[in-house]
């Protein structure tokens, strides 16, 4: 437990430092523990150390973990969402970060309607245009957001991206800056002030992401160690 608690404190200190450098309140950044391949025992350790939000990449891995851990943690879906898994994603997750097409949005909306709940979503954007990554191209996002706002049981609250893997975190800065600029353009238009979230930054680059405006960072390795 001491190891995870120590790592968590270190990440929290780095978040605070990055926010301070950017002239921001550290409390404006939500830390999400990315728990892909992390067993429930280690998640409990992180909970005991004060972490409340966790992100899962795969529905089939997430559901049994969520059931085992019970009430308390707040869960985010942060992996690629397949249409045939949308119903399962609607139930246990407080937010889905990876809606990247109207087709997926409409599938989630139908599942949310059947479950009689509103689902907060982020639109995943492939800012760098990497063929290996999911996400909508930036020029398509404004129309996509407006179409999603017409879905009765979805609440689009912001944008999400995964930056290219680079050895120097500063090399990802422009990706994060571009996502923030896109979010700001949408907020200044008809989308409104409620569209504020920026889910960007992982273990290798989260400090740069915070300096560029991230409101949510998804941290796995820096808290839980290498994946098993």
Image: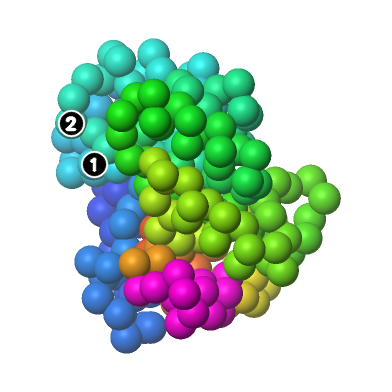
Instruction: State the predominant SS element of the stretch in magenta.
Output: helix
Q: Which mark is residue 72?
A: 2
Q: Is residue 151 above or below residue 111?
A: below
Crowding around mark 1 (Cα neighbors within 10 Å: few <14, some 14 to 19, many 20+) is some
Residue 67: percent from left, percent from top: 30, 15
Is the C-beta separation of discs 2 and 1 under 8 Å? Answer: yes
Quarter of the picture containing the N terminus is top left
Residue at the location (48% across, 30% down)? Answer: 110
Query: Does residue 24 show up?
Result: yes
Residue 81: percent from left, percent from top: 58, 33
Crowding around mark 2 (Cα neighbors within 10 Å: few <14, some 14 to 19, many 20+) is few
Q: Which mark is residue 52?
A: 1
| In the foreground, 137 or 128 | 137
User: Would you identify the image quadrant in which residue 144 lies?
Assistant: bottom right
| In the foreground, 55 or 49 | 55
The secondary structure type at the circle numbered 2 is loop
């Amino acid at each position: 437990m001491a190891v995870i608690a120590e790592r968590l404190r270190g990440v929290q200190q780095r978040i605070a430092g990055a926010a301070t450098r950017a002239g921001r309140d550290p409390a404006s950044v939500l830390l999400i523990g990315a728990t892909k391949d992390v067993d429930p025992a280690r998640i409990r350790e992180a909970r005991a150390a004060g972490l409340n939000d966790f992100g899962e990449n795969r529905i089939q891995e997430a559901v049994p973990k969520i059931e085992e851990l019970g009430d308390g943690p707040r869960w985010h879906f942060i992996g690629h969402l397949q249409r045939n898994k949308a119903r399962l994603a609607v139930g246990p997750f407080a937010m889905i970060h990876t809606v990247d097409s109207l087709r997926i949005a409409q599938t989630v909306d139908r599942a949310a309607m059947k479950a009689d709940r509103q689902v907060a979503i982020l639109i995943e954007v492939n800012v760098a245009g990497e063929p290996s990554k999911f996400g909508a191209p930036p020029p398509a996002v404004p129309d996509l957001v407006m179409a999603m706002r017409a879905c009765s049981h979805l609440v689009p609250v912001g944008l999400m991206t995964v930056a290219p893997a680079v050895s120097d975190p500063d090399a990802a800065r422009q990706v994060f800056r571009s996502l923030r600029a896109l979010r700001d353009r949408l907020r200044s238009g008809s989308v409104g002030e409620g569209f504020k979230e920026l889910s960007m930054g992982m273990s290798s680059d989260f400090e740069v992401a915070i300096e560029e405006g991230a409101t949510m960072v998804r941290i796995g390795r820096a808290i839980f160690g290498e994946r098993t």
